[in-house]
Amino acid sequence: MVMRNLNKLVVGLLLSFLFVACQSYKKVPYLQDAEVVLYGVRNEQLYDAKIMPKDLLTIVVSCTSPELAVPFNLTVATQNNAALSYTTTQPVLQQYLVDNEGKINFPVLGELHVGGLTKKATEQMIVEKLKPYIKETPIVTVRMVNYKISVIGEVTRPGTFTITNEKVNLLEALAMAGDMTVYGLRNDVKLIREDAHGKQEIIPLDLNKAETILSPYYYLQQNDIIYVTPNKAKARNSDIGTSTSLWFSATSILVSIASLLFNILK
């Protein structure tokens, strides 16, 4: 009878362990139930970033007669080596900071509203405005110089990353930061975003679900912040570490006091 009850207890413990293990595993893999993506409604257009206030732009105008484009390609002198007793300068393209109203001041053309436009739309607008000044159709290239995103929390290498191609999604951002640690919650990743009007929002994302790929927040905007929430195990370890440090500090103080009293009273 005792052995039968003992066997039932062992089987029960094993089943409980297997159940917990299965539940824990389900929280680890990314993008489960991938068939949801196959049959889900998705946006067929390729992502194209929009210009926002405080973006830093470079704008290059090119044509077959370079002298015609010179007034539109301003350059500024930069110091090459400050450690030398003499200074040498090398011209670089003028950068344009988008103000809070989404405007820049462009040479000859004056004030241009670029906020909320994609690069392609901005290039087309400038080409149209250049027609009175350049007889042929020029080539205009717009680039965002300070397109950056930040990844913090439970990742291997938290930090701020510059995106040279101005296009990055959530999984790519995590890959840049060395992926999540074992303490990161896959189902509670927070996206912190500020819109063109300065309004901030926090969007929770579940990377266990494949449908996250269909989310409008899957592709990141400039200055987005990804925060990976730690799980309860990390919080407990942190508490234990802090408590242990305090305990050792208190013990060391008590030992020091006891040793001092012993030396005085002996």
Image (spheres, rainbow, N blue to C red):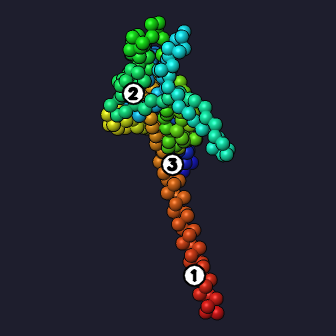
Number of marks in picture: 3
Disc 1 target residue = 257
Question: Separation of disc 1 and disc 2 at Cα?
Answer: 71 Å
Residue name at image x 56 percent, y 33 percent: 77
Pinpoint residue 36: horizontal percent, then vertical percent. 43, 19
- Secondary structure at badge 1 equals helix
Amino acid on which the number 2 mark rests in the picture: Asn
| Crowd band around label 3 with a 10 angstrom C-alpha radius: few (<14), some (14–19), many (20+) | few
Pinpoint residue 114: horizontal percent, then vertical percent. 37, 24
| Crowd band around label 2 with a 10 angstrom C-alpha radius: few (<14), some (14–19), many (20+) | some
**Which of pointers 2 and 3 indicates the residue nearer the eye?**
2
| Looking at the image, residue 253 lies above or below residue 109 | below
Disc 2 target residue = 105
Amino acid on which the number 3 mark rests in the picture: Ala
Q: Residue furthest top?
A: 136
Quadrant hosting residue 220: top left
Quadrant hosting residue 97: top left
**Which of pointers 1 and 2 indicates the residue nearer the eye?**
2
| Looking at the image, residue 129 lies above or below residue 232 | above
Left or right? Give the position of 92 relative to 130.
right
The residue nearer to you, when weighing 10 against 161, is 161
- Secondary structure at badge 3 equals helix
Residue name at image x 50 percent, y 22 percent: 73
- The quadrant of the image that shows the C terminus is bottom right
Point out the tag, 2 or 3, that comes first from the N-terminus: 2
Disc 3 target residue = 233
The residue nearer to you, when weighing 180 against 104, is 104
